[in-house]
Image (tube, helix red, strand yellow):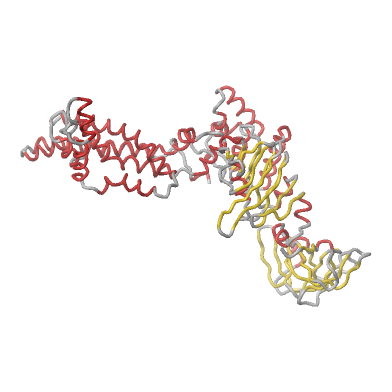
Amino acid sequence: MDWTAILLTLKLASLVCVVLMAIALPIAYWLAFSSWKWKFLIESIVALPLVLPPTVLGFYVLVALGARSPIGRLWAGWTGHPLAFTFEALVIASILYSLPFAVQPLASSFSQVDRNLLDASATLGADRLQTFTRVVLPLSLHGALAAAVLSFAHTVGEFGVVLMVGGNLPGVTRTVSISIYDDVQGLNFAAANQTALALLIFSFVVLALVYALIRRPWSVAAIQ
Amino acid sequence: MTLSVNLRKRLTPSFALSVQFSALPGVTILFGASGSGKTTILRCVAGLLRPDEGKVAIEGGAVFDSDTGTNIAPNKRGFGYVFQDLALFPHLTAEQNIGYGLFALGPEERRARVLRIAAAFHLEPVLGRRPAEISGGQRQRVGLARSLVTDPRALLLDEPLSALDHHTQSRIIEDLRLWNAARRIPVLYVTHSQREVFALGDRVIALHDGVIAADGSPETVMNAPETEAMASLAGFDNVFDARVEQRLESAGVMRSRIAGTQVELEVPLGVAREGSAIRVAIRAGDIMLATEQPRGLSARNVMPGRIVALVTERSQVKLTVDVGIGIHAAVTPTARDTLGLRTGETVWVIIKTHSCRVVSAL
């Protein structure tokens, strides 16, 4: 079993999950509550990674982060080494690739919160941020949990974008899925099987935990 | 404290709200059918909906003024609002719901205030429970307590008691009256229930199609409607045309004939001239029925007819009696059984002169 790849994958997925939640919360809030008439354009952009082949996304990320791009040059000037084919590039690509998996469950659970509750909160003196932290977020916990788990799990499982942007550097960019692919290419089926099985069991346990936790402790419907 | 409201708001191409009134401390009822604009008024006053133009002020200070561009956010207005569906926070206990608006206070003072109002609204036993775990009446009380505990400058109630039985309604109304007796804030109370109008109102403003149709005490607005729209709002089930035959000034009555019939009807003296057309409104509950021709009766209008329809709705039996036109009457189930009232039977319809209201056709 490729423990280096497994640890690297967990590190990547955890980091992406934390950053994504911070980015996705305001985007999802805006998508759920804005009445801007061009909102559908933003919704489409957020959903793009769902339909694009990972190679397309990976290609553009590679171009955007490359040594000749403004971002790539800025990074090289700042850190002294290029951005492409590094762990940081992998994090950036994974965040883009998993964005809809964090935004959509959040936006959907935000928009399911009864608008009267928001009005009630306002008439009781709460501003928007207070209403968000005290009403919207607590009533969207299942959505937040789903967003966190899906973005984590989706990052664990990604392959094409990683290959395009990160390459295959052991301990730096070789994740579990790349490692399995490598083993299979080298006809090392026993090693591939061990890692694949570990990933399979891990994914199942995480999903089972989430579905067990998602059962809501109170019923909104019973109030009516 | 006086709440002055002057609003214009176009909601659809065919419906616009246009009202102006001032509400003194105490309960002002906003009464009207659904779609008359009652809830829109509350939402505009609370700041949840922006009026097209007008001014809303409490004790002289504007919270909205289209002339100066003033539009204070709902969370800064200090108005309590109890929603029709209550909008209690499902994830919070009754205590947390009531204390929600007191976030600026320390935990001890917050708890003290919550406990004080919980006592006034008989909520101590359920403070630890979530909304889904308490009864409808208790939820209503939590909704009221949650708004009142913040010491609002005005209270806006949107049909807060419509889902409750009469007994529970009366008890909550009593608690609300007691609470407001000491504080004296203006309360706008939206309802479409005639019963609540009489139970609560110091004053009732009746709305019809976005404008004020009548304004006054429940007695005058509900029992002496001036317009046909108001008559049907106030539960006058019979509204029909008649023609004045003779004015009897000394008796204070007019003899009239119901349009399209030979049926005579004596109505209270009004301004209509002899020969002119009038509209007459009569409540179904004000009409008496007899199975034999009554004698020695003070009521002046007695006419024979045939029962053409009979429907039982809960504790009321609604009948239509053909006396030349269909007259709607309502009796109790006991009366129906004792008199043996059935479709096709002949009965005598008895109407007191002063049960007839002459209304203008609006």
Q: Which of B301 and A127 is in front in this view?
A: A127
- In the drawing, does residue B158 fall left or right of residue A22? right
From where the camera sits, is residue A169 visible?
yes
Residue B96 drawn at (x, y percent): 54, 31
Residue A78 drawn at (x, y percent): 23, 25
Q: In which quarter of the image is residue B26?
A: top right
Q: Which of B327 and B330 is in front in this view?
A: B327
Establish if B34 lies above or below B262: above
Q: Nearer the viewer, residue B149 or B328?
A: B149
Q: Nearer the viewer, residue B199 or B104?
A: B104
The residue at the far left in this view is A187
From where the camera sits, is residue B163 visible?
no
Q: Quadrant of residue B128?
A: top right
- Tell how many labels: 0
Residue B247 drawn at (x, y percent): 89, 69
- In the drawing, does residue A147 fall left or right of residue B55? left
**Quadrant (top left, top right, bottom left, bottom right) of the N terminus of chain B:** top right
Residue B276 drawn at (x, y percent): 81, 71
Establish if A218 lies above or below B269: above
**Quadrant (top left, top right, bottom left, bottom right) of the C terminus of chain B:** bottom right
Q: In which quarter of the image is residue B347?
A: bottom right
